[in-house]
Image (cartoon, rainbow, N blue to C red):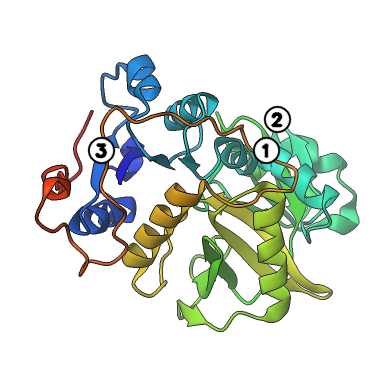
């Protein structure tokens, strides 16, 4: 297979997704790595050529990569994840509305351009968790104990914010990763309690959490995603959803994720029946034939013309 990975500048040296790129190339697949924030791209022709079997994005909020992924989807190319699904979970205002509309256990959510405006939130809902609407990786998340402390929570240049009632926890969240239907649960230190003594590790996945996380994939049309969960008095509460997370603590993560990417590239992604409708899939005839997918390193390219078409890219080619 021939794949295109869009890797934002923040992740250009990161093990995830570059370890996945290396795994795929070691299996005999061709992977082009595009840096949307640092490359000159003849994008109209690169997308329209349709020579990649799938496009994969490791993005940051507000980065240029999502627009390129949307361009690929607009002409009918397969993307991992679906571009509209990514945008829906990148905007936490939109995420909360969609999630609560579909009955997912997400806290009531308020939105404002400045933290001070959350003073009108009912007192009984404090403490509040305040964070940027386009934030990720725990950046900018803070706990505000009462309305009188909102002024201290002001931070310049954050843009739109959201606030949700705090769900008491012991200093850790349950982070659940989904790889094309395969779930892995891990304990992770909460960004609200950075000094808490937490043993970050893989743990068994409770059935009620598995049900909620599976529904997240169905509602948002995501194939590769992570969900942060805390346990409240009424059961699990979803406090964050993100596309293409780190998959930290997942055993053999690079190999598992590479296999999931290949499967999604072959099938075109999940059967999405929720809020995010998929773009119509228009078959684009590749300009050159590609070898058959090889989902295991032992099944490398053999002799013959198929072997000649494999381009090993240890560090990822740039186009």
Q: Position of residue 82 (x, y in %)?
A: 55, 41
Going from the N terminus, do you reach mark 2 or mark 3 first? 3
Residue placed under numbered mark 1 in the picture: 161
CB of mark 2 within 8 Å of CB of mark 1?
A: yes
Rendered view: 225 above or below 47: below
Q: From this viewpoint, which residue is outermost toward the front?
A: 304
Rendered view: 183 above or below 280: below
Residue placed under numbered mark 3 in the picture: 32
Count of numbered tags: 3
Q: Nearer the viewer, residue 246 or 211?
A: 211
Residue placed under numbered mark 2 in the picture: 113
Residue at x-position 30% and y-position 32%: 35
Q: Is residue 244 at least partly visible in the picture?
A: no
Q: Position of residue 9 (x, y in %)?
A: 32, 36
Instruction: Rate crowding at label 2 as few (under 14), some (14 to 19) or many (20 or more) other CA atoms within 10 Å.
Output: some
Question: Residue 238, labelled with which disc?
Answer: none
Rendered view: 75 above or below 34: above
Q: Element under label 1?
A: strand
Q: Nearer the viewer, residue 27 or 130?
A: 27
Left or right, 221 with respect to 136, comes to right
């Amino acid at each position: 297979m021939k794949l295109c990975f869009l890797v934002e500048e923040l992740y250009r040296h990161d093990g995830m997704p570059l370890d996945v790129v290396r795994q795929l190339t070691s299996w005999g697949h061709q992977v082009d790595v595009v840096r949307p924030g640092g490359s000159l791209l003849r994008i109209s022709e690169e997308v329209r050529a349709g020579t990649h079997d799938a496009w994969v994005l490791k993005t940051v909020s507000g980065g240029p990569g999502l627009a390129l992924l949307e361009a690929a989807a607009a002409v009918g190319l397969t993307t991992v994840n679906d571009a509209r699904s990514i945008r829906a979970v990148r905007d936490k205002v939109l995420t909360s509305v969609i999630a609560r509309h579909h009955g997912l256990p997400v806290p009531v959510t308020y939105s404002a351009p400045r933290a001070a405006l959350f003073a009108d939130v009912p007192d009984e809902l404090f403490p509040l968790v305040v964070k940027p609407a386009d934030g990720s990786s725990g950046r900018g998340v803070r706990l505000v104990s009462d309305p009188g402390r909102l002024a201290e929570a002001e931070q310049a240049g954050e843009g739109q914010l959201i606030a949700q009632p705090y769900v008491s926890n012991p200093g850790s969240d349950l982070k659940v990763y989904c790889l094309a239907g395969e779930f892995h649960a891990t304990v992770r230190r909460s960004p609200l309690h950075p000094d808490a003594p937490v043993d970050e590790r893989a743990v068994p996945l409770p059935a009620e959490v598995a049900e909620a996380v599976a529904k997240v994939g169905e509602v948002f049309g995501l194939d590769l995603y992570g969900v942060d969960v805390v346990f409240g008095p009424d059961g699990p509460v979803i406090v964050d959803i993100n596309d293409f997370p780190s998959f930290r603590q997942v055993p053999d993560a690079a190999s598992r994720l590479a296999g999931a990417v290949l499967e999604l590239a072959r099938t075109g992604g999940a059967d999405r029946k929720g809020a995010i409708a998929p773009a119509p899939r228009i078959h684009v005839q590749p300009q050159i034939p590609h070898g058959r997918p090889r989902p295991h390193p032992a099944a490398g390219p053999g002799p013959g013309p198929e072997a000649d078409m494999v381009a090993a890219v240890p560090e990822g080619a740039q186009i």
